[in-house]
Amino acid sequence: MNKWKALAGSLVLGSALTTSGMVLAFQDEDCGHHGHKGHHGGGHHMERMYERMAEKLELTEGQKAQLKADREASKAARKAHRQEAHAVHKQLREAIESGADQATLDALGAKLGQLEVQKMQRRQQMHAQFEAILTDEQKAKLEEMKAERKARYEERKKRWKTDES
C-alpha cells in the first residue's frame, strides 16, 4: 500500500511541476463536475489565472488564439477521459463495498493507473504544444515562473512540516 501512496504522490507532484502554467492555458471551460465550475467557481477563477499568465508572458493575440484553438480541439477527448475515469472510480468503490475479490480490485486499479498515465501523456503533449508557440524570451520567463512557484511550494511544505510537529 505504501508503494501505491508513494507512486500516487510522485505522479501528482510530478504532474503539478511539469504542467505548471500550461495547465492554465489549457483549462476546461467546463472544469469541475456535478454541474459546477470546479473548486471555488473554477471557470471564472481559471480564466483570471490564464489572463494573468498570458499577461506575464506577454502573449500576442495570435498566441492566445492558438492556445484557445488547441484547447477547443482537445476538449471532447478530455471530457471523455474524465467520464471514463469517473466511471472506473465508481466501479472500484462499488467493488470494494461489495467485497469483490483481489483480482477484480487489481484489474480496476490497473485501469485507473492506465488512465492516469494517459492523462499525464496528454498533459505533456499539451505542454509541448504550448511551448511550441512561445518565443525564446517567453520560454525563459515561463521557466522563471516555474522556479518561483516551486520555491513557494517548498516554503509552504516546510511550514506544513513544522505545523505538524
Image (cartoon, helix red, strand yellow):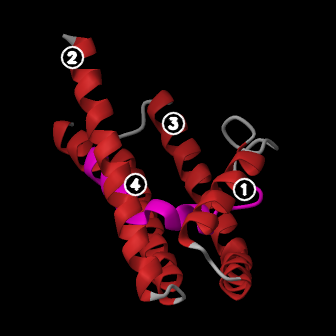
> Helix or strand or loop: what does disc 3 sit on?
helix
Residue 27 x/y as whole percent: 64, 62
> Helix or strand or loop: what does disc 4 sit on?
helix
Residues under labels 2 and 3: Cα distance? Answer: 34 Å
- Looking at numbered disc 3 in the image, what kind of residue is underneath it? Arg
**Label 2 belongs to which residue?**
162
**Label 4 belongs to which residue?**
16
Earlier-in-chain disc, 1 versus 2: 1
- Looking at numbered disc 1 in the image, what kind of residue is underneath it? Glu
Earlier-in-chain disc, 1 versus 4: 4
Earlier-in-chain disc, 3 versus 1: 1
Residue 156 x/y as whole percent: 32, 31
The question of residue 133 being in magenta is answered with no
Q: Is residue 48 left or right of residue 5?
A: right
Please report the bounds of the magenta region as a residue range: 9-30
Above or below 162: residue 1: below
Q: Are marks 3 and 4 in contact (CB under 8 Å)?
A: no
- Looking at numbered disc 4 in the image, what kind of residue is underneath it? Ala
Q: Are marks 2 and 3 in contact (CB under 8 Å)?
A: no
Would you call the spot at circle 3 few (<14 residues within 10 Å), some (14-19), or many (20 or more)? few
Residues under labels 4 and 2: Cα distance? Answer: 23 Å
At 68% from the left and 61% from the top, the residue drawn is 51
Which of 66 and 121 lies nearest the eye of the viewer? 66
